[in-house]
Image (cartoon, coloured by chain):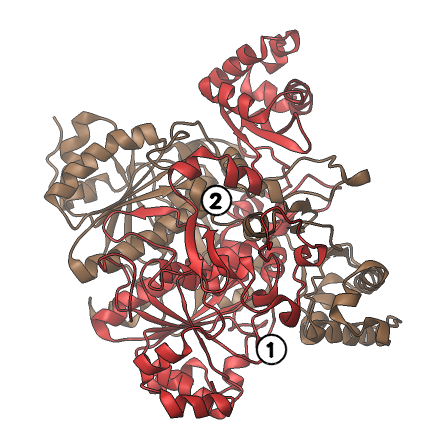
Chain colours: A red, B brown
């Protein structure tokens, strides 16, 4: 297929991925594969009842930049495919750039046969349906291996396909709760957990699925062997609980939510401190005595800071409540960016707590490195999407993938893909569409 | 690749040798690659890697072999005493680099830029070599030399602003934004480093060429903030943090509910008819009286607003409060709701599901003289690639002789 990603210096050149994923946990992984040069074909059902509801989930572009967003357009996970359309979600556009888009109805027997034909011509298939859906369709790994013994099949589920919870469903927050990540985030008891303000475990699993796929592709290239990968979002979360289970087993200590403090070292002050403005904060982390001396100098060496109890790291940690109150009183009237720059000039780790608007409009680092990548979308026009955080000198990643586009419109590449991959076109394609298979 | 390796992709990267210099920022990348079978050799200065000084410690006493942090993040790795900042060690380093496929290094941009000169010389001699650096902001840009920790990266990268608690009265926040613990800025950067290295190994398969990979921790955190950025870019809305659920432009109902045995349950409901019907079945199942089958609640949009939403929310609270968390988990899942108890990390050690999947590996900790169980797996399956850990972290310099002999490093005078 045509490509717009430079001279073909791609890490995953020649790798075709059949992408049945939806929402976020699956598409994040195929986004990575597309960025690294795989040909990712997003397969979706035209039937509204079976549509990825991210397609009609806010946010949507304002008609004019100055327009206020309508309230119903900014509510969470709301949305209606009729009034919102199925191609206008900014969230969908951000998670699905660089992919081709075709329609196929797996509830239709002919649709399922066509999927098998696609799999026969692919290297990888990814899905994150409810755990038993593909098996119900007769499209489990065991079935697909029959048409392509080399196929790499990745199934992403909340808890994992094998095991006691084999049929359990899960969104990112489900996995976060189960894994321990939710309870690790927040202020100490009796406060409840603060958890995560988004589906962290819809995103991280994509990094693992892509990593495992790429390892499998190397073997496939050499030996022709395929495999099945049963990826569990909850297990990714457990992997990320770090040393908590070790501390429990070795020292009998259950992880206590540390707020923004550092539980494992005498680093203090270590937190978010209020600054001038509405809900504006700066994060400051003092990790040694020299930084403490530099901080007190920046504060003008107030009397409280010269007390003996703050002289050592252990003393500062032991008196952290008092210390935090004093630092907060000092930061409260200051501009967070000016303060960040002054503290940084003295070698102290300090960073403004940046909201989306800050990162997009006033982060000179992201701007200078061109982090946000503008991609054209066939209905929405040109919009910026999150870039790729690694620069590969010989095989650069490009979030526009092979399409050079934002997310595909529903079925945008149906004609081209069926013609080029399966040789289905013209009358045959029309009749398959009419009978609801494609 | 040998037949045995081809048969078992637990060893997917088994043919590769990776040198890992640097600090805590990149250790998780080495851990992931070691878990996929690569031989990862940690290069440490005489006083050990910085993270050997990170708690928690065995029996709460510090010491280079007592850090549980170092132990967790360096499973399966080897350790060679070699100070990459000591020019006198360069000849030995270059000898070892000659047997390596990948070098990972992490630290400040200033340190990395200096060491990169050495790595580039190595790449001239061995063009197949892949060099991956992990720095706070990448190797250029106005913030390049900012001092950073995990906390400040989470702040600047945008995750922290969307995590925390509901505002208090009049919508004003009386709590700060919260950085979810622990070390997730480094986890994210290391995940991108590991996947980029795996990509570069693919590219080398195709072309024979190595390359340089530059990971910016700031950008890695920025790629993982989900709705917050599109909400701003498309609709100009700034999402506001809420307790243990998605930050949103306008307030939404709570997800966390206390169960009868005082455990939080994440009772999340997607705005679909399917999940609403499942909720009705669950209320019926547990005998909680309700009126949700009346026409007032028939429409997704209508029941997601105002008094209807509040009423549904109240019923969910009542429902969860009526049963122990584990029972609520199992019955909700059986009836089609993706609820889960909010577990402490150690709760999963004894969970039958994770036991069956081998989520935790029992590994001998030599300092303790016994095995402990460590999170070790994210995927299982039909001889697909996966993570597998069998050895604890190396003692400082434990493999110096072995690796020096293999790389034919002359003993230093």
Q: Point out residue A279 in the picture as x, y percentages from the top left corner.
A: 67, 34
Residue B362 located left or right of residue B206: right
Residue A436 located left or right of residue B52: right
Q: Same chain for marks 1 and 2? A: no
Name the one closer to the observer, A83 or A65: A65
Position of residue B139 relative to residue A103, above or below, is above
Q: Secondary structure at mark 1?
A: helix
- Location of the C terminus of chain B by quadrant is top left
Q: Point out residue B47 in the picture as x, y percentages from the top left corner.
A: 34, 28
Residue B240 located left or right of residue B285: left
- Real-space Cα separation, disc 1 to disc 2, in angstroms: 34 Å
Q: Which mark is residue A276?
A: none
Q: Nearer the viewer, mark 1 or mark 2?
A: 1
Position of residue B292 relative to residue A374, above or below, is below
Name the one closer to the observer, A433 or B124: A433
- Location of the N terminus of chain B by quadrant is bottom left
Name the one closer to the observer, A149 or B410: A149
* Residue B83, visible in the rendered structure: no
Give the residue number, with chain letter if any, for mark 1: A48
Give the residue number, with chain letter if any, for mark 2: B221
Protein chain holding label 2: B
Residue positioned 61% across, 49% down in the render: A196
Q: Secondary structure at mark 2?
A: helix
Position of residue B204 relative to residue B138, above or below, is below
Image quarter of residue B281: bottom right
Residue B298 located left or right of residue B274: right
Q: Point out residue B251 in the picture as x, y percentages from the top left corner.
A: 74, 50
Residue positioned 53% across, 66% down in the render: A87
Protein chain holding label 1: A
């Amino acid at each position: 297929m045509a490509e717009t990603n430079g001279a073909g210096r791609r890490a995953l050149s020649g790798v075709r991925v059949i992408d049945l994923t939806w929402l976020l946990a699956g598409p994040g992984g195929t986004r990575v594969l597309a960025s690294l040069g795989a040909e990712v074909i997003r397969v979706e059902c035209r039937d509204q009842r079976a549509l990825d509801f991210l397609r009609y989930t806010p946010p949507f572009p304002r008609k004019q930049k100055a327009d206020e967003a309508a309230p119903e357009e900014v509510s969470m996970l709301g949305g209606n495919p009729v009034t919102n359309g199925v191609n206008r979600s900014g969230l969908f556009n951000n998670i699905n750039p660089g992919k081709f888009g075709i329609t196929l109805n797996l509830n239709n027997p002919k649709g399922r046969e066509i999927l098998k034909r696609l799999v026969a011509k692919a290297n990888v298939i990814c899905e994150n349906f409810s755990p038993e859906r593909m098996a119900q369709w007769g499209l489990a790994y065991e079935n697909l291996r029959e048409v392509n013994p080399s196929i790499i099949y990745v199934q992403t589920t909340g808890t994992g396909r094998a095991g006691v919870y084999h049929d359990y469903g899960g969104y990112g927050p489900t996995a976060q709760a189960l894994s321990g990540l939710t309870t690790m985030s927040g202020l100490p008891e009796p406060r409840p957990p603060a958890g995560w303000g988004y589906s962290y475990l819809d995103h991280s699993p994509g990094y693992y699925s892509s990593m495992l796929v790429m390892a499998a592709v190397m073997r496939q290239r050499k030996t022709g062997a395929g495999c099945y990968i049963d990826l569990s979002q909850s297990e990714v979360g457990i992997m990320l609980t770090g040393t908590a289970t070790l501390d429990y087993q070795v020292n009998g200590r259950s992880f206590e939510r540390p707020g923004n403090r550092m539980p494992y070292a005498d680093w203090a002050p270590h937190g978010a401190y209020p600054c001038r403005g509405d809900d504006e904060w700066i994060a400051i982390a003092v990790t040694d005595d020299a930084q403490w001396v530099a901080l007190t100098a920046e504060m003008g060496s107030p009397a409280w800071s010269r007390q003996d109890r703050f002289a050592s790291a252990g003393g500062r940690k032991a008196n952290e409540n008092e210390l935090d109150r004093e630092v907060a009183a000092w930061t409260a009237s200051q501009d967070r960016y000016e303060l960040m720059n002054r503290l940084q000039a003295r070698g102290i780790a300090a960073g403004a707590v940046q909201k989306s608007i800050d990162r997009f409009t006033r982060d000179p680092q992201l701007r200078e490195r061109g982090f946000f990548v503008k991609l054209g979308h066939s209905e929405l026009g040109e919009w910026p999407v999150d870039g790729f955080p690694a620069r590969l000198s010989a095989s650069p990643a490009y979030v526009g993938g092979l399409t050079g586009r934002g997310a595909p419109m529903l079925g945008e590449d149906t004609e081209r893909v069926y013609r080029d991959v399966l040789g289905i076109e013209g009358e045959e394609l029309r009749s398959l569409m009419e009978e609801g298979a494609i | 690749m040998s037949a045995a390796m081809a048969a078992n992709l637990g060893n997917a990267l088994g043919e590769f040798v990776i040198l890992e210099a640097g600090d805590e920022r990149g250790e998780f990348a080495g851990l992931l690659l070691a878990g996929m079978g690569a031989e990862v050799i940690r290069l440490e200065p005489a006083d050990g890697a910085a993270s050997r000084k990170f708690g928690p410690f065995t029996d709460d006493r510090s010491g280079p072999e007592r850090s549980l942090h170092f132990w967790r993040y360096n499973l399966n790795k080897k350790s060679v005493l070699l100070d990459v900042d000591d020019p006198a060690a360069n000849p030995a380093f270059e000898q070892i680099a000659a047997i390596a496929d990948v070098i990972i290094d992490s630290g400040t941009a200033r340190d990395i830029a200096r060491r990169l000169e050495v790595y580039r010389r190595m790449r001239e001699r061995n063009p197949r070599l892949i060099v991956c650096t992990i720095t706070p902001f990448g190797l250029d840009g106005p913030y390049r030399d900012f001092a950073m920790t995990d906390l400040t990266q989470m702040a600047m990268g945008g995750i922290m602003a969307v995590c925390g608690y509901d505002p208090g009265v009049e919508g004003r926040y009386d709590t700060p934004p919260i950085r979810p613990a622990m070390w997730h800025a480094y986890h994210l950067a290391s995940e991108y480093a590991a996947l980029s290295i795996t990509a570069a190994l693919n590219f080398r398969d195709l072309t024979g060429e190595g390359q340089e990979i530059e990971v910016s921790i700031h950008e890695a955190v920025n790629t993982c903030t989900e709705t917050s950025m599109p909400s701003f870019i498309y609709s100009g809305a700034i999402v506001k943090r809420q307790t243990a659920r998605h930050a949103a432009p306008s307030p939404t109902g709570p997800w966390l509910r206390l169960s009868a045995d005082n455990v939080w349950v994440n009772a999340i409901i997607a705005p679909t008819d399917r999940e609403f019907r499942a909720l009705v079945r669950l209320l019926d199942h547990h005998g909680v009286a309700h009126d949700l089958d009346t026409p007032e609640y028939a429409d997704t949009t209508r029941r997601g607003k105002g008094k209807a939403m509040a009423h549904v929310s109240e019923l969910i609270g009542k429902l969860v409060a009526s049963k122990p968390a584990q029972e609520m988990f199992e019955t909700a899942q059986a009836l089609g709701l993706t609820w889960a108890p909010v577990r402490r990390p150690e709760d999963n050690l004894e969970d039958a599901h994770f036991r069956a999947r081998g989520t935790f590996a029992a590994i001998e900790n030599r300092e303790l003289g016994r095995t402990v169980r460590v999170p070790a797996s994210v995927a299982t399956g039909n001889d697909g690639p996966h993570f597998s850990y069998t050895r604890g972290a190396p003692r400082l310099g434990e493999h110096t002789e072995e690796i020096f002999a293999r790389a034919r490093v002359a003993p230093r005078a």
